[in-house]
Image (cartoon, rainbow, N blue to C red):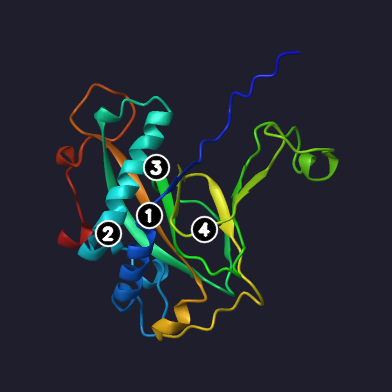
Amino acid sequence: MIAHSIFPTLVCEFNYEHRDQLKSKVFERLPNHINEFGQSNELTANVDLHKDPALVDLFEFASTCAFSYLSALNIDKDLFDLNLVKTWMNIIKEGHTPIHNHADAHLCFVYYVNVPESYVKPINFIATPQPNELFHAMFLHNVTEYNSWNSTERYFEPHEGQMLVFPAKLFHRTSGYGSGTEIESPDISSFYDKRIAIAGDFLLTYSNKIGRSYGLMPATNWNTYSQKHK
């Protein structure tokens, strides 16, 4: 038998060589990206870290990694612009991030700024649905040994300076310790024992108008309408 793995999922891993300098900048800039309770995430509307001049090098690196991801797929990356539409922090010690995806975007990245030595909780990527599963939960109880065709999850243990790039529609989750309830504090010193990650979403648009049935035309081709102006 010749077995062909035709539907793998590409997750690319990169390492940022200036991680220590960036970590210092992030802690310096934290007061500008947290609320009064010491929280910083999508729900606090802190979604514009890419607009902070002190962090510009990280997002230049993220765009380089994203273009490398496209190259790994043999995509003609010269056809596309990457639009970084949202960035935020994920700060975890006790809390958990449930299974979710970023399917309103095209490509996603996560960069690990601070990973305490005692923090070994991974990020888990989940095949939902698993294309080879013949009925629901078939692989959960009936597999004798997991491989690339029957696995439903793949995890990565984070380390400082690591960046992962993956399809935004890919389901994933992260875990914390304890009850899952964070005790928030605006005191910056309290952040050193938490895992701090910066995530972001890219939308791909064509760089120029082009004859294609699929894909987003450049933003210069868009008209924007708002009900509040009517």
Residue linked to disc 2: 50
- Between discs 4 and 3, the one toward the N terminus: 3
- Between discs 2 and 4, the one toward the N terminus: 2
Q: Position of residue 226 (x, y in %)?
A: 21, 56
Write the residue at 66% across / 46% down: 153
Residue linked to disc 4: 159
Cα distance, mark 1 to mark 4?
Answer: 18 Å
62 vs 8, nearest the viewer: 62
Q: Label 4 crowding class (10 Å Cα cut-off): few <14, some 14-19, many 20+?
A: some
Write the residue at 23% across / 65% down: 54
Question: On screen, 101 above or below 214?
Answer: below
- Between discs 2 and 1, the one toward the N terminus: 2
Q: Are discs 2 and 1 less than 8 Å apart at CB?
A: yes
Point out which mark residue 106 bears.
3
Q: Amino acid at mark 4?
A: His
Cα distance, mark 3 to mark 1?
Answer: 11 Å
Q: Secondary structure at mark 2?
A: helix
For marks 4 and 3, give the one nearer the viewer: 4
- Between discs 2 and 3, the one toward the N terminus: 2
Q: Amino acid at mark 1?
A: Gly
Cα distance, mark 4 to mark 3?
Answer: 25 Å
Q: Quadrant of residue 174?
A: bottom right
Q: Position of residue 211 (x, y in %)?
A: 24, 21
